[in-house]
Image (cartoon, grey):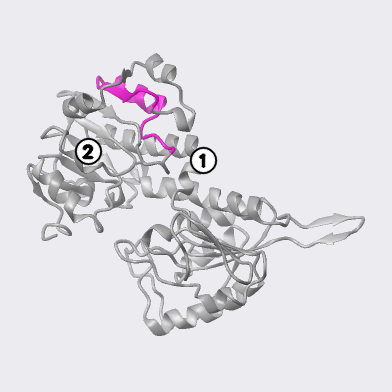
Amino acid sequence: MILFAPKEIDSREARTAITPITAKRLVDKGIDVHVEESIGELSNYSDNEYTEVGANLITDRSKALSDADIIFRVRKPPVDEIKKTKSGCIHLSFLDPFNDSELLQLMASQGITSISLEMIPRTTLAQKMDALSSQANITGYTSVIYAAEKLDKVLPMMMTPAGTISPAKFFIIGIGVAGLQAIATAKRLGARVTAFDVRQEALEQAESLGAKALRIDLGEDSKEEGQVYAKELTQEQLEKQREAQAKVCEDSDVVITTAKVFGRRSPILVKSDVIGRMKHGSIIVDLAAETGGNVEGTEIDNEIVTDNGVRIVGLSNFESMAAHHASQVFSANLGSFIEHFWDEDEKKINLNLGDEILAGCVLTNNGKIVHEKFINS
């Protein structure tokens, strides 16, 4: 069985879908691992590291796509490469399924078994495969480091002969995986951190990391039983939330927003009138920029400075700012997926779509769209 990992072609992308460590794990299982030449160049993995663990370097990308039984990628494939992929191939990557129905139709017509990393259930059993969470951890960390570099202040309190320097103030909106990592990182750097989420248990987690929780009575707990993502709020709840947040934003040096509603446009949580009241030189990092943004005026993959000197950062790939470790955990997620479904006797992946994990993340199989959320797309 041949596994091929091509080099990413998006100019924003420095990650690789497979590292030498994961390549060795799969080679040891009897998989013939092929990687495109210089696949790890931007994430600091050399070609020699791959060949030393038994992987094969490939220069003919088109042939490798047509030969592969399994394909690892970070981002979704371009149309011309889907058409080169052989029928029956198992493809694993982020696929953005809610926003790209044409891609699913094409993958189905090509006979590809497509596995969307975004759709892997967030359960205990699937935790080792959860690429969304592993990458969100990196994003939370790098967003704080990025803001600290751009901010014209030091983060910790300093006692100096010339007087006391007050700690920088961070406000984290959305306490998921990225938000928790942002809180932890900012606290380690000495900043004073306030955090908000509609879920009470998330606020308690923030407090356990040393943040001050902003508690807003929205009338009901927005976390339903068994729900992983924050529930979408009513307009009245959103307005109440925004006003309470506005007061914290005015006093903050850095605001980091992480609120994504999976499969929908992100809610606007910081409007222009609030930005207009913020301090000159303060920074807003919008981690929801790819799904429309939480901040009014966010421009994807751009930084803008408002008339009152607030910097709004809408970069879409904070993961690539720590590409080496982002690749390490992403690749480990994919390797764990293969290992979990690997049949040692037959030396192949056992795709039983009745399995809870596969039912959640396999989108196309045997020439058709099979996931219930996208069958009519």
In this view, the residue in front, 2 or 10, is 10
Which residue is at 38% across, 82% downward?
Answer: 235
Report the span colored magenta: 14-38
Q: Is residue 231 left or right of residue 243?
A: left
Q: Are marks 1 and 2 in contact (CB under 8 Å)?
A: no
Q: For the point 17% across and 25% down, which residue is it?
A: 67
User: How far across and down, in percent of the image, does residue 138 sit?
Assistant: 49, 46
Considering the image in quadrants, where does the C terminus appear?
Answer: bottom left
Q: Position of residue 266 (x, y in %)?
A: 38, 66
Mark 1: few, some, or many residues within 10 Å (few <14, many ≥20)?
Answer: some
The amino acid type found where label 1 is placed reads Ala
Q: Position of residue 192 (x, y in %)?
A: 67, 62
Q: Is residue 353 visible?
A: no
Q: Which residue is mark 2?
A: 91
- In this view, the residue in front, 213 or 366, is 366
Quick check: is 35 in the magenta stretch? yes
Which is nearer the eye, 345 or 168?
168
- Which residue position holds label 1? 322
Is residue 296 a member of the stretch shown in magenta? no
Q: Amino acid at mark 2?
A: His
Q: CA distance from mark 1 to mark 2?
A: 25 Å
Of 230 and 249, nearer the camera is 249
